[in-house]
Amino acid sequence: MTSKWTLLIFTLFFSLVMGEVETKCSHGYSEASEGCVDVDECDMIPDICGKNATCTNTNGSFSCQCTDGFESKSPISPGYPITCEDINECMTNNNICGPNAKCNNTISHYLCFCENGFSTSTGVTTFHHSDNVICRDIDECHQDNICGLNASCLNTQGSFYCVCNSGFRLKSGKSNFTDDSEQCQDICMIDKTICGNGTCYRGASGHYCACHAGFTNYGNVKSSCTERNCDMFKDVNNLRETLAIAQDYFMQLNKTCHNLTEIKNPKEMDGEDLLKGLMSTVDELLFSRALNGKKKISTFLDLMEHALRLIGPFLSTPVTKRSYIYTEMELLVEKGSVLPKGTRTLSSTHAQLDIELEVAAGDPSHYPGFTTVSLLSYSNLEEYADGFFSAMKPDEKQSYKINSKVVTVTVSNRNTRHLKEPIILTLHHLEQSNEISHTCVFWDSSENDGTWSSHGCSVVESNLNHTVCSCNHLSSFAVLMALYEVENKFELQLITWVGLSLSLICLFICILTFSLIRSIQGPRTTIHLHLCISLFIAILIFLAGISQTENRVGCAVVAGMLHFFYLAAFCWMCLEGIQLFRMVVLVFNTNFKTLYMMAGGYGVPAVIVAISALVNAKGYGTEKYCWLNLESIWSFFGPACVIIFVNIFFFLITVWKLAQKFSSLNPDLDSLQKIKAFTITAVAQLFILGTMWIFGCFQFEKGTIVMSYLFTIFGSLQGVTLFVMHCLFSKQVREEYERILSRISAPQKKKYSEFSSHSSKANGSKSTQDTKESHI
């Protein structure tokens, strides 16, 4: 090649030199007899363009072109050789061979062949894109006995796999195989524990388990047999004592449980019917208020856990949501031979549960072929379960109250005393306050017949609306909020004792005044007399027995008497408003009959207290005071509010009628002024007595010290207020007090003389007053 190029260069050089000397021919031409003719470089030098290239002669020059399957990486210029490289068609066009085929590049070309498990449609081994050949799947399962005994072949695109027939399994535990290195064997022979506490047999449809006595696989004969304890449903007598309403349903559950553990081939139960019956029974229990004790609550909650664990496996749908009057429930069921994994979230209106399915399933060696998780929320159970905090250790001046709905969490895993991973439970608050601390608790039925306990539970997060709890065991859960006793207890007690002592003295003076001074006696003074008597007895009972909580019965009696006499005071105030209304509106018969006044003043509160005691006898008396608990407090506040509104109604009409009478042509100004003064006094009296109980409503949170002082001051000085308004502000009463004091300080003889004169004047004044009131 080098010699050829040397010869070409020499020839060109010689031509150029000679041409300059002898001719005028251009480059690429040579002189001939007929003149300048083209030089054929391609003929002169056959490999002038290089390998894998072709040469084309042109006038005065030549051009090079790569052959098929090759390409030049550099630009092609006339008169110059090129370097041609092989084109990799398999790289430039990935799908050149079509689906299920592979491409193999060759020098100047390529070859296509089918992948393993496929063959060409024409039978050729290799092909090109232009041959219109396709690769088709080979069905290996048509080969004889490719999977061996006790196995079935399943063809796939380009391959196949073998699966064991029912009742057989690979010893390695794999689900399938593709070679003859393994063979399917009888499950009952490979795994002696596959049935748990049962005996394994191989039938036409595969293996099945016959459970031993006391064990069950919930009607799924291919599942492992697990223990099913029916003792919780067996004790019918205990159910009759604690939950008589639910006795029939739980007897049915007891029978269902026995069928599972004692019948050799139990029928599959209807989970929907069982669940519906359970929810209806719970609604009936919560509606009837039968759960009035911690022992009954413990029995109820334990039964709910056992019932949900029993019913769950029989539900056909993966997720079941039910909402009833007093309950709301979501139940999750995962079925299959493989232990489920992952996090699941269950929710209700007032709660949310986040739990790992591995935790819900429990020990893999005792996996029964299903996993259940349930979240059950009760709408009013917190009312019955509140107050049982013997396992809690509150700080000084601190108490607890339930501030969420009670929820029950149940899983199929029977060992839930200490979970591998804690559950996360979000409970929404019933009362919202930034100043309240919250505690996550569960119901511990093993301690003191039942109590709330915080053992194993902690607060992850708590805000105004909800608290997030983390618990390493399962049960029924709730959130407690801390209530704080009123601070500055000594100062408040001092104000209370001093104020109530003054009130007792003032009320005693009022009682003597209204009962002994005849000149002022009338329907209004009778009402004032019994108002003072009611408050006097209420204060006396308060001072003597409000803290006597040692005897529960005695404490309840004290609370009932306080309830009665404080309501009586409100009723007598209501009667005064009605009496003023009658004095202004009616012309004749303006006075109440004494019997009617007694029925309204003492009969109405007696009926209210009797009904309240019958409905909730345990509402009288708390752990610290002999007064109504929070469940029964509205049996006092309710009637008191009604009386206040009735009084306001009558006072408004009375003021309106007074205004009309003052604007009349011939008003009796003396009588109207007197009624006006009576009305102002009655309104002030209602304001003072009613305001006290408004302040009393704010005694349930920390930081209410101002309200506590106002409540204490208004409450302890009620008697003093009544004495000032009805005695000291009354000119007639003051005059009587002056006469009495003058008689006490004057000589004995003068006393008798003045007494006679006073008696005649008093009789005259009384007659005049009665005449005026009758006239009005």
Image (cartoon, grey):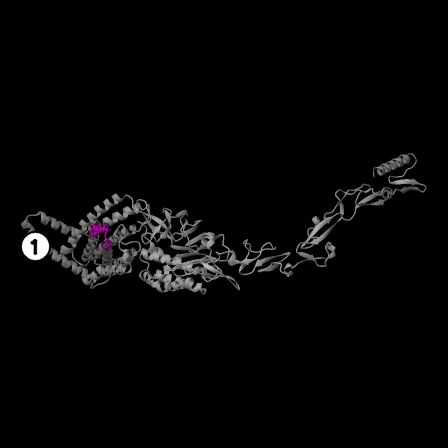
Q: Nearer the viewer, residue 689 or 582?
A: 689
Q: Which residues are magenta?
A: 540-556
Question: Dividing the image into 4 quarters, which one contains the C terminus?
Answer: bottom left
Membership of 542 in magenta stretch: yes
Residue position for label 1: 756
Q: Is residue 589 above or below residue 751?
A: below
Report the front residue among 378 and 355.
355
145 or 603, nearer to the observer:
145
Instruction: Name the main secondary structure of what is drawn in magenta.
Output: helix
Give the percent coordinates (x, y) of residue 759. 10, 55
Q: Position of residue 66 (x, y in %)?
A: 78, 46
164 relative to 670 in the view: left or right: right
Residue 18 in view? yes
Tell me the residue at 91%/35% (across/down). Answer: 18
Residue 116 x/y as whole percent? 66, 54
* Res. 728 in view: no
313 to the left or right of 146: left
Give the position of the N terminus as an image quadrant: top right
Q: Quadrant of residue 46?
A: top right
Q: Quadrant of residue 33?
A: top right
- Residue 632's x, y, as percent? 29, 56
Closer to the camera in the image, 612 or 300: 300
- Residue placed furthest toward the left: 749
- Amino acid of disc 1: Ser
Up-down: is 348 above or below 11? below
